[in-house]
Amino acid sequence: MKNNRLLYNLKGFISILLPKFYFQKIKNKIIQKSFRRKDIKYIIERVNYYCPLNNFQSLQTDSKLNDHKLTKKLTVYFFDTYEFTRYFHDDLKWCYEKGDVNYFLPQPSITKSRPIAAADKNQNSILLNIDKVRHFTFIKDPYLWENKKDKVIFRGGCYQAHRQKLLGMYFDHPLCDIGHVGWEEENLIKYQKPKISIKKHLEYKFILSIEGNDVASNLKWIMSSNSIAIMPKPKFETWFMEGKLKANYHYIQIKDDYSDLEEKIYYYLSAPNEAKKIIQNANTYVKQFFDKKREKIISILTLEKYFYHTKQIQPIEVFLQNPYLYPIHKA
C-alpha cells in the first residue's frame, strides 16, 4: 500500500535525462491552457494558499536553480522540487529550506512544511509537494467501519516528549494498541512494539495521527481509509493543507495533553453514524489531490507566483487579464 520508493527514484533519475529547455518552452502554454479550465478559481485559491506572498521582495541569496543538484542525501527532495523547477530558467534565484520546517522563515523560501499561522506570519513559507513518496500515500480500504476493531492504534518513533507522554498514558489501556517503533532507546524499551503494515492498521476503527518534528506522515492515508484519524489540532502543514481541516468533521480532535482520548473513543463508538460521516468527509477531502494534471498546474503556478513576487519574472498576459489572479499580482 505504500508508494514504491525504488520505482519512484527510478522515475526521478529518468526525469533528469530529459532536456530542461523543453519544459521551459511549454510552461507558458500550460499556464495559458489552465485559465480555460472550469476549476481555475479553485486552482488559484490553492496557489494563494501555498504561496501567500502579497508584496514584492528581493531575495538575499546567491543560490540559483542551476545550483540545485542531486546528492546522496534527500534524494526524493531533489526529485520533487526538480519536477517543477525545471520549467523555469536556471538563472533564477531561490531559497530552499530542506527537511522538517517547523519554524518561520526570514525570506521567501520553498519548503515542504510550515507552522500553521496567519498569512502575514507565514508568507515566507512557500509550500511544494516535497517527499510525497512518504507523505502522499492514499489507500483503498478493504474493511468496512462496522467490521473493524473497537480500538485505537498507533505505531511510530516516539523520540519527542509529547509522543512519550502518549505512551505513558495509554500504553496499557484496553482501548489502545500503541507502541514505539524505531531505535531501542533505554527509556523506550518498555514501550517497544513491532512495526506493522498499513493494512494491519486498517483493522482498527481509530488511528492516532500524532505530529512528530512537523506533520504526521500517516494522516493522508488514514483520511483515505474507512478508519478515523484521532489527533490534537494540527500545528504544522504541508501540501495537504492541514490548516484547512475541520475538527470533528474531517478528524476527531482531542486535547493536546491527550486527556480526553478515552472519552472521544467511547463517544464515537456509541455514535456510529457520526463516525461514518467523518469518514465520508475525510474521503471527500483527499480526493481533491487525485487529479495529477491539476496538481502539476498548481505546482507550476505556485512557483510562477514565487518568482514573480521575488522580482525575477514578468507574468504572461493571461495572468493580468484573469480576475482570479488579482491576489497573486497584488503589490
Image: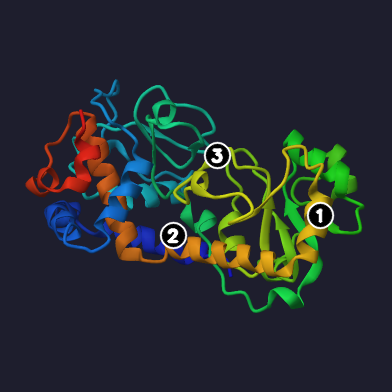
Q: Which residue is mark 2?
A: 9
What is the secondary structure assignment of the residue under circle 2?
Answer: helix
What is the secondary structure assignment of the residue under circle 3?
Answer: strand
Q: Which mark is residue 278?
A: none
Q: Which residue is mark 3?
A: 236
Using the numbered discs, state the Cα–Cα distance from disc 1 to disc 3 in whole angstroms.
23 Å
Q: Amino acid at mark 2?
A: Asn
Dot 1 or dot 3: first in sequence order is: 1
Q: Amino acid at mark 3?
A: Phe
Q: Quadrant of the C terminus?
A: top left
Dot 1 or dot 2: first in sequence order is: 2
Residue 15, quarter of picture: bottom left
> In the picture provided, is 79 more to the left or to the right than 16?
right
> In the picture provided, is 145 more to the left or to the right than 261?
left
x and y percentages locating residue 293 in the rendered image: 30, 64
Dot 2 or dot 3: first in sequence order is: 2
Check disc 3: other Cα within 10 Å, few if <14, some if 14-19, many if 20+.
many
Q: Which residue is mark 1?
A: 178
Using the numbered discs, state the Cα–Cα distance from disc 1 to disc 2 in whole angstroms.
32 Å
Q: Amino acid at mark 1?
A: Ile
